[in-house]
Image (tube, grey):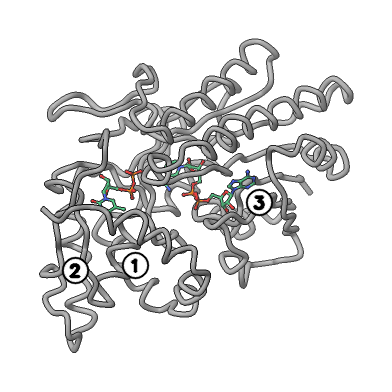
């Protein structure tokens, strides 16, 4: 059995990765370290395949003693690092926690690995860092997509904290020779995404007849990656990449936010023909823009395709449809989030003060 420490494995992508890995590799044992912030939930880890190979530990990645103890006692061979504060709008309203978790937390993990290596020579724990395309900043229309050598130019406190963590990970490879790999992926979507992000927020609001808040003109462009495709890419990089390498991962599409919302609404119109809110797109409301809003992201995936043979399998249309269906079929999961109260206060804090336009 290979012992794997996954950080942030109760969040959106982390929980999908836990599920994917238990299904894909019978020889892994997962130790899942997660602080269960507002974004993490044990509900995301219900009904895991082969749950005996998964241990959940509630804890903070900034807790150096805990991380060192886990590395030693659980004889960890691989760390897959998802834990982060991940929402741009929250980083605008309160950046402090992003600096703590994303920078200090990543530093704590790297330091723990450096010490572990010194105290246990020959134990080279592979560290895989999950990062974002947002570290590269914003593209103008027509500019070429981000490659792995695009200079980092983050716009939001979130992106800046992720860029800082990427720099630290690289530095620990260059300086101490820690065996690290990094993936910078585009916007993920799919099951278990917390409904503060565009796609689940729009599905839940539309289903309940609430306004669909589009920031600014809605012409911003993202590259959307279905979460299961992302999980496959991560596992491929971990298994096949040389230490020190970075790979961009993207879904290969360039819709505007309004096009995404239009597609979600059309799917809801079709799946809920008796809804009192038809057509759902009529619920769209343009609201005050996000400060520092990146206009366009686009990810060049030629390196991972050429070197590791990975490319996304799920079309945007199919992925969006599967996602809408998943949210419609999981009212209990949604009710669990709504019941916490934190979600409602976030919605009020982020949206009530935004002027309609
Ligand atoms: P998420 O917000 O859904 O989950 C984050 C998880 O980390 C939660 O379970 C939370 O409890 C945990 N966590 C937060 N602070 C912690 C701490 N101090 N100690 C331990 N656990 C802590 O995030 P996500 O969308 O699943 O993103 C996972 C990773 O992927 C992040 O590093 C993020 O930057 C990156 N990423 C996400 C996207 C996306 O579209 N969601 C895109 C690119 C990159
Ligand atoms: P989001 O899902 O927060 O991801 P990111 O900011 O990391 O790309 O937002 C995706 C896009 O959708 C982004 O351009 C902001 C926009 N957006 C809205 O227009 N309205 C909203 O209510 C939200 C949450 C996002």
Mark 1: is the Cβ under 8 angstroms from ligand 1? no
Indicate left or right for 33 with 270 as reference: right
For the residue labelled by badge 3, is the local secondary structure a helix, a strand or a loop?
A: strand
Mark 3 beta carbon near ligand 1 (under 8 Å): yes
- Which residue shows up at 43% across the image and 79% down it? 331
- Which residue corresponds to the image point at 66% horizontal and 10% vertical from the top-left? 175
Q: Position of residue 199 (x, y in %)?
A: 31, 58
Q: Earlier in the sequence, mark 1 or mark 2?
A: 2
Which residue lies under the disc numbered 1?
322
From this view, report whether residue 354 is shown above or below residue 158: below
State the CA–CA distance, disc 3 to disc 2: 34 Å
Label 1 or label 2, whichever lies nearer to me, is 2
Where, by quadrant of the figure, is residue 125 drawn? top right
Camera-side residue of 195 and 221: 195
Camera-nearest residue between 190 and 193: 193
**Mark 2 residue element:** helix
Of tags 3 and 2, the one toward the viewer is 3
Q: Callout 3 environment at 10 Å: few (<14), some (14 to 19), or many (20+)?
A: many
- Which mark is first along the chain, 1 or 3? 3
Decide which of 220, 186 is in the foreground and name it.
220
Return the x and y of residue 274 as percentages of the image width and height.
18, 89
Label 1 CA crowd tier, 10 Å (few <14, some 14–19, many 20+): some
Q: Which residue is the site of mark 2?
A: 265
Spatial CA span between label 1 and label 2:
14 Å
* Residue 153, image x, y percentages: 35, 21
Count up the numbered dots: 3
Look at the numbered discs 1 and 2 and tell me whether their residues touch, using CB distance below 8 Å. no
Q: Secondary structure at mark 1?
A: helix
């Amino acid at each position: 059995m290979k012992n794997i420490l996954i950080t942030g494995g109760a969040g959106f992508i982390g929980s999908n990765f836990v599920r994917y890995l238990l299904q894909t590799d019978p020889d892994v044992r997962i130790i899942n370290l997660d602080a269960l912030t507002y974004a993490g939930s044990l509900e995301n880890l219900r009904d895991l395949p082969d749950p005996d190979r998964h241990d959940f530990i509630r804890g903070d990645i900034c807790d150096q003693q805990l991380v060192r103890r886990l590395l030693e006692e659980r004889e960890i061979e691989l760390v897959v690092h998802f834990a982060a504060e991940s929402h741009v709008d929250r980083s605008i309203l309160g950046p402090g926690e992003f600096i703590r978790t994303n920078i200090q937390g990543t530093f704590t993990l790297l330091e723990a690995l450096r010490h572990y290596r010194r105290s246990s020579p020959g134990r080279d724990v592979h560290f895989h860092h999950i990062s974002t395309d947002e570290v590269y900043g914003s593209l103008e229309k027509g500019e070429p997509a981000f490659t792995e050598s695009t200079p980092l130019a983050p716009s939001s406190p979130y992106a800046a904290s992720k860029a800082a963590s990427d720099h630290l990970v690289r530095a620990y490879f260059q300086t101490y020779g820690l065996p690290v790999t990094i993936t910078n992926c585009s916007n993920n979507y799919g099951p278990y995404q917390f409904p503060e992000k565009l796609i689940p927020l729009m599905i839940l609001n539309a289903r309940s007849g609430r306004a669909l808040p589009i920031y600014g003109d809605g012409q911003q462009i993202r590259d959307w990656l279905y979460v299961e495709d992302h999980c496959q890419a991560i596992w491929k990089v971990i298994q096949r990449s040389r230490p020190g390498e970075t790979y961009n991962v993207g879904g290969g599409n360039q819709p505007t936010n309004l096009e995404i919302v239009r597609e979600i609404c059309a799917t809801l119109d079709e799946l809920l023909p008796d809804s009192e809110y038809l057509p759902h797109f009529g619920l769209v409301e343009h609201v005050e823009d996000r400060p520092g809003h990146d206009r366009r992201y686009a990810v060049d995936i030629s390196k991972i395709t050429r070197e590791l043979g990975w490319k996304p399998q799920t079309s945007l249309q199919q992925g969006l449809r599967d996602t809408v269906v998943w949210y419609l079929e999981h009212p209990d999961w949604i009710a669990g989030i709504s019941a916490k109260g934190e979600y409602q206060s976030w919605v009020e804090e982020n949206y009530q003060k935004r002027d309609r336009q």
